[in-house]
């Protein structure tokens, strides 16, 4: 394994970066069900493009080791993870109460191999964080990750486990401050909520706001307590184009980098913000979307690139392929090479597609107002918070299989355990303002213990008390849940994907 990453001189954008790319050849086989817009097949399409463009040779290609139950439980509730592990399409009929309790069923269906799918995509993101922590690469990529809506004990918006929160927790073992940036069209609610009251993680989400899933992400939601001004929400309207988007992205991110000075950055590259997305309503081109990756990369800070939404799958593959090129510092040709999935890309067979002529509802004045307000909030953070950083907790050992040596059946089981119990450190949600005292009764590693003290308020998530709830309480809670979930990401199981 090469070493020496993470220590590049700043400045020259053309500088090559060491890139680790996580991919499991099985991931494209998982299937959410007929008519469901979320299609893991898009990762296989992306991989096929990378292969045919000859990009795989320039990266360290790794097969993620599946995240173990205890890895997932560093953020998620034990009973929720245990439920995900046990539930199958055959047994779900007998589990109606549990399904409701964990919001599994419609947007987030039970399908064959669901738990393995979660282990795979979370394993890639945690593995990427470990590689960055070790300085084995400058950029780690896991297009299967980025499932930003998942909550501590609830699935949401096609997301079951929150690989992003898990990856950030891993990065926090090495880095005092971690920046999370989300360019999916939907608000990055699960990640924001997890870190809402800490100043060690800043979350910045650019999203469609107003009568749109998940309903959160108001500009006035900027964090709480120690985390005040460490959550940044950029509410946008339909039809935003490349120029308008960058008129916010660049000044805001520049200011964030200046005042927060993160040790590592996680960029969620949800591709449902592209023009022509099946569920989205923005008008970004692949180049406009990738400009966020290019800009983020220019700061020379260890970078974890993750996937996310994206429902016109031919464009998702185009986008993530091009962005892999950006990570590598390679300009990918527009004309596509012939490969197994070439038929998806007709009639032009090009990587780039023109944005549409849809109206841009984000007028100049509105964008300027948003920019000014957010820059003002950020200017209140004079200095990056100085964390008294202590000895680094042990890494989660998720040794990945080098794709080149994959046939060796020698996948070391992760040996060391991390004793971090993150489950109790919970941020309040703006939807239900219910603060409960945190009960830190487990011996945590010092550094994360310190973080625990910072996160003093705790949200008791909807289902965490359910194990002791009476049937009546449970029924009431389910009704509430139904109301809350009335805004769904995917309401029409009508047409199957165009291909
Ligand atoms: Zn999305």
Image (cartoon, helix red, strand yellow):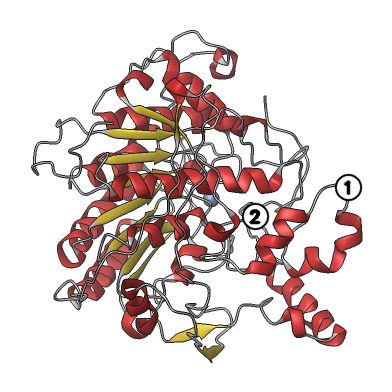
The residue at label 1 has a CB less than 8 Å from ligand 1: no
Rendering quarter of residue 78: bottom right
Residue 431 at what x, y percent from top left? 57, 78
Residue at disc 2, secondary structure: loop
Q: Which residue is mark 1?
A: 90
Is 488 placed above or below 446 here? above
Residue 166 at what x, y percent from top left? 46, 58
User: Which quadrant would the N terminus be assigned to in this image?
Assistant: top left
Left or right: 371 as drawn, with respect to 104? left
Residue 405 in view of the camera: yes
Is 68 placed above or below 233 here? above
User: Which quadrant would the C terminus be assigned to in this image?
Assistant: top right
Left or right: 91 as drawn, with respect to 276? right
For this rendering, which residue is in front, 42 or 26?
26
Mark number, residue 489: 2
Residue 83 at what x, y percent from top left? 73, 61
Rendering quarter of residue 320: top left
The residue at label 2 has a CB less than 8 Å from ligand 1: yes
């Amino acid at each position: 394994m090469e070493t020496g990453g993470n220590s590049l001189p700043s400045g020259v954008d053309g500088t090559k970066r060491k890139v680790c790319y996580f991919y499991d050849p099985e991931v494209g086989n998982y299937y959410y069900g007929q008519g469901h817009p979320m299609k893991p097949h898009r990762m296989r399409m992306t991989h096929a493009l990378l292969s045919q463009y000859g990009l795989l040779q320039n990266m360290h290609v790794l097969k993620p080791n599946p995240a173990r139950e205890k890895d997932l439980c560093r953020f998620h509730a034990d009973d929720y993870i245990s439920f995900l592990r046990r539930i199958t399409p055959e047994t779900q009929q007998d589990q109606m109460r549990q399904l409701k309790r964990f919001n599994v069923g419609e947007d987030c269906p039970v399908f064959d191999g669901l738990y393995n799918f979660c282990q795979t995509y979370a394993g890639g993101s945690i593995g990427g964080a470990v590689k960055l922590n070790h300085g084995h690469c400058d950029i780690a990529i896991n297009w299967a990750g980025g499932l930003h809506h998942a909550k501590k004990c609830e699935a949401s918006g096609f997301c079951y486990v929150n690989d992003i929160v898990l990856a950030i927790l891993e990065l926090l073992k090495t880095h005092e401050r971690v920046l999370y940036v989300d360019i999916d069209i939907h608000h990055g609610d699960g990640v924001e909520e997890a870190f809402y009251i800490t100043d060690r993680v800043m979350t910045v989400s650019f999203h469609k706001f107003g009568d749109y899933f998940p309903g959160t992400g108001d500009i006035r939601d900027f964090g709480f307590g120690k985390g005040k001004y460490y959550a940044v929400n950029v509410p946008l309207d339909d039809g935003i184009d490349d120029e308008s988007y960058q008129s916010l992205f660049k000044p805001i991110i520049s200011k964030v980098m200046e005042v927060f000075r993160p040790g590592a950055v996680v960029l969620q590259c949800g591709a449902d913000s592209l023009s022509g997305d099946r569920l989205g309503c923005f008008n970004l081109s692949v180049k406009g979307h990738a400009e966020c990756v290019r800009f983020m990369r220019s700061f020379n800070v260890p970078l974890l690139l993750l996937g996310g939404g994206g429902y016109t799958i031919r464009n998702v593959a185009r986008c993530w392929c091009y962005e892999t090129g950006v990570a590598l510092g390679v300009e990918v040709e527009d004309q596509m090479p012939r490969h197994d999935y070439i038929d998806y890309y007709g009639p032009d067979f090009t990587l780039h597609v023109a944005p549409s002529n849809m109206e841009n509802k984000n007028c100049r004045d509105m964008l300027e107002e948003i920019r000014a307000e957010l820059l003002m909030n950020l200017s209140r953070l004079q200095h990056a918070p100085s964390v008294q950083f202590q000895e680094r907790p042990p890494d989660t050992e998720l040794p990945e299989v080098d794709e080149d040596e994959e046939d060796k059946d020698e996948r070391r089981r992760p040996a060391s355990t991390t004793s971090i119990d993150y489950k109790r450190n919970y941020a309040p949600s703006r939807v239900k303002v219910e603060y409960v005292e945190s009960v830190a009764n487990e011996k945590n590693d010092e550094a994360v213990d310190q973080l625990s003290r910072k996160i003093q308020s705790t949200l008791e998530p909807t289902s965490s008390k359910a194990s002791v709830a009476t049937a009546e309480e449970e029924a009431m809670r389910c009704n509430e849940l139904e109301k809350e979930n009335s805004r769904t990401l995917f309401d029409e199981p009508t047409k199957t994907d165009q291909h």
